[in-house]
Amino acid sequence: MGWVILKGRCDMLRTRALVVFSGLFCLGLIGQVRAADFFGENMIDVKLALPKGDTYLRGATDPVEGLVAEITLTNSTKKENLGTVQVTVPDNKRLTPDEIGTLETLSKEEQTALVEKKKGTKSIEEKPVNQDSLGAAYVEPQLGPHDVIDFLITRIPEEGEPAPAEGAKPVYVARDNKPDSISRVDLAQIKYLAAGETSPVFTLPVGKYYRVREPGTYSIKAVLRTIGNSGAPNKFAESNTEKFRVLPFKAVNQPIEDVQREWEFFERGIPNFDYLLYQVVNNQGYDEVYCVQRIPVRGIATWEWTRLCSVKSGTTAQVAVLNPKKVAVLAVHHKGDAGLYTLDFSKPGAVVTAKVIDVKEGATPKLKVEAGAASVE
């Protein structure tokens, strides 16, 4: 893996070409020399986007279902001029044999005048030297067998939660899944990004590989370890920062008894949240929604499970966060009507407010939240 920086005419290898290698070499190369250390800051602009929006459910297998990031690289140096330009170059004429023979008889001033008469110029066409254009080779960003990109994901305190202490280091979400496969020699294809050009969009399954276990609001940005940027704190190219919310809701294709018995398996460890909602299956042909709340008893955490409602088979309950301790749920019941539920977890024992919604045949009600209040449209 490495960088190839071509200064000047990027379509030709000349003596002024500079090759900078960076990254992880298995051939005994020690140390790192980054392109940005030579050519300034932020030569490659990294753009991160969340194409599926900013709200996600917790996954039955992946930590966050459907959380993908789109990464685009743009070479911010000036685009090359690949045409030709007219330039003026010296065009000096030779002295004739007679003029050479008379040089000894001429004074120094006359010799200088004779030489000056022979000087001239002419116009020619040539390809320009693109001094401000730098081409770059890069390794395609990917997760899995070849991790050349890191996603820095950290939870943002909700309303009412204490803010991090001043100067405290951020706590990043840990990388979860190991690579699906690995060969004896991993080969990553090197790609070229010309000056002023933009790469294809690379779509990466972040939710599959990062352990976002706790519901809440998170920030995310990408760091590419094979692209240098002398202006960044860690000297690597970084993307913009985006935010997303993980809802306290998970749909599991298991009965509630299995979820309760194998809870640490479903949560990849001991749960560290205050409450959560689960949509589970039963043996009567429809699903059900249960909520679970952490209740401390004499300093020991206990968990209280409560059945909320039924859910029509083939549909998923809609969930929205009204505030950090209050959640709205809209579910189409197996009988055909729907229910709008508000759950308040601010005290031990969830306080549930329910409202029955008539559903016309073929209609799909949608949960709407405005100013912290839930309604159906």
Image (spheres, rainbow, N blue to C red):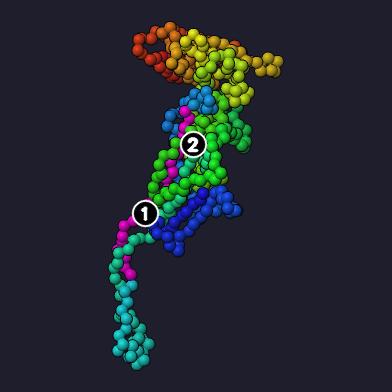
**Up-down: is 284 above or below 59?**
above
The reply to whether residue 161 is in sight is no
Indicate the secondary structure of the residue bearing disc 2.
Answer: loop
Give residue 357's position: percent from left, percent from top: 41, 9
Give residue 148's position: percent from left, percent from top: 52, 42
Which kind of residue does numbered mark 1 sit on?
Glu
Please name whichever residue, 331 or 280, is drawn nearer the observer in this view of the structure. Answer: 280
Residue that appears at 38% across and 57% down: 11
**Up-down: is 178 above or below 247?**
below
Residue that appears at 54% across and 49% down: 23
**Up-down: is 211 above or below 198?**
above
Give the label, 1 or 2, closer to the camera.
1
Q: Residue furthest right?
A: 298
The tag on residue 23 is none
Badge 1 or badge 2: first in the primary sequence: 1
Asked whether residue 165 is drawn in magenta, I would say: no
Indicate the secondary structure of the residue bearing disc 1.
Answer: loop
Please name whichever residue, 119 or 286, is drawn nearer the observer in this view of the structure. Answer: 286
**Up-down: is 19 above or below 47?**
below
Give residue 121's position: percent from left, percent from top: 30, 72
The reply to whether residue 7 is in sight is yes
Query: Would you call the spot at circle 2 few (<14 residues within 10 Å), some (14-19), or many (20 or more)?
Result: some
Which kind of residue does numbered mark 2 sit on?
Thr
Asked whether residue 73 is drawn in magenta, I would say: yes
The tag on residue 80 is 1
Residue that appears at 37% across and 54% down: 80
Quarter placement of the C terminus: top left
Q: Which residues are magenta?
A: 66-89
Distance between the alpha carbons at the discs numbered 1 and 2: 30 Å
Relative to 28, is 298 on the left or the right?
A: right
The tag on residue 241 is 2
